[in-house]
Amino acid sequence: MKNNKEIVVLIGAGAIGQAIAKRVSTGKHILISDIKIENAEVAAKTLTDAGFEVSTTVVDVASRESIEALVSKAVSIGKVVGLIHAAGVSPSQASPETILKVDLYGTALVLEAFGNVIEQGGAGVVISSQSGHRLPALTIEEDKALATTAVEELLSLPLVNLNNVKDSLHAYQLSKRGNSLRVRAEAVRWGKRGARINAISPGIIITPLAQDELNGPRGESYRKMISASAAGRAGTPDEVGELAALLMSEAGAFITGSDILMDGGVTAAYFYGSLAI
């Protein structure tokens, strides 16, 4: 017999996802999924110790079969009222091919699959990146293609053909721009179910992923971005959690299809400040 609990699905068990889950899951069951079960279990202990009801599972966001299994597990527990998609790989972690598969295709797949089951009044948030806002403008046709191309055809677009992608950073920027556009398009479909979906594009948030970047080949450029920004510091997972909580709550009920940039002013400095080329 189906347990009719309200479910928040967390994809990606890192610090940002946990910070959001803590703020939006009171009285709800959290289903934590990650490509590494040990990551999910560590997050589960933290949230369980904080008083939440939690279960875990493995997921590979780049696999349709895996995402469909995650959806099936979620709806077997109860009603999916929240989605936190915080999984991804960074330019220092992966090849262009892997980044496009995980960050671009994977996000589109997640939005499609959970858009089919999200409950009326439900809401979701996708963690994108400031990098998508620094990619030069695409054509109207390219924007529409990234937003609306059928998921299984997405990686066949000329724009993301590996011959046209310069390096891992370029693949990441394309993927994150695609996330923003995909969220906008999916908001229309989610809206027909009475649900909302938004994206957040954080800047440098101190997490293990950010530490990889700070200690990687682009570390010096990251430190330069921080020093040149209006905030003059990196952000915290809790700050992202506060914004996500607004977007997923009744206080944010008029916000859907949006991508909110929260980078301490790095993008502003990139276009109009000391980081401008």
Image (cartoon, rainbow, N blue to C red):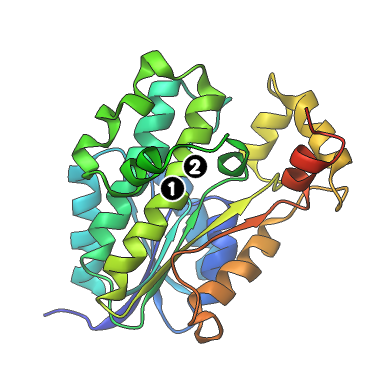
- Tag 1's secondary structure? helix
Please name the residue shown 25% across and 49% down the image.
Answer: 67
Q: Is residue 202 above or below residue 273?
A: below
Where residue 207 sits, quadrant-wise, is top right
Tell whether label 1 touches label 2 (CB within 8 Å): yes
Please name the residue shown 38% across and 22% down the image.
Answer: 97
> Residue 46, percent across and down?
56, 62
Work out whether residue 126 or residue 86 is closer to the camera in this orientation and state it: 126
Quick check: 56 left or right of 168? left
Work out whether residue 134 or residue 80 is closer to the camera in this orientation and state it: 134
Going by the numbered disc 1, the residue's amino acid type is Asn
> Residue 57, percent across and down?
32, 53
Going by the numbered disc 2, the residue's amino acid type is Lys
- Tag 2's secondary structure? helix
Please name the residue shown 24% across and 72% down the image.
Answer: 77
Figure quadrant of the C terminus: top right
Q: Residue 179 got which mark?
A: 1
Q: Is residue 70 above or below residue 137?
A: below
> Residue 166, percent across and down?
50, 16
Quick check: 260 left or right of 204? left
Q: Residue 176 got which mark?
A: 2
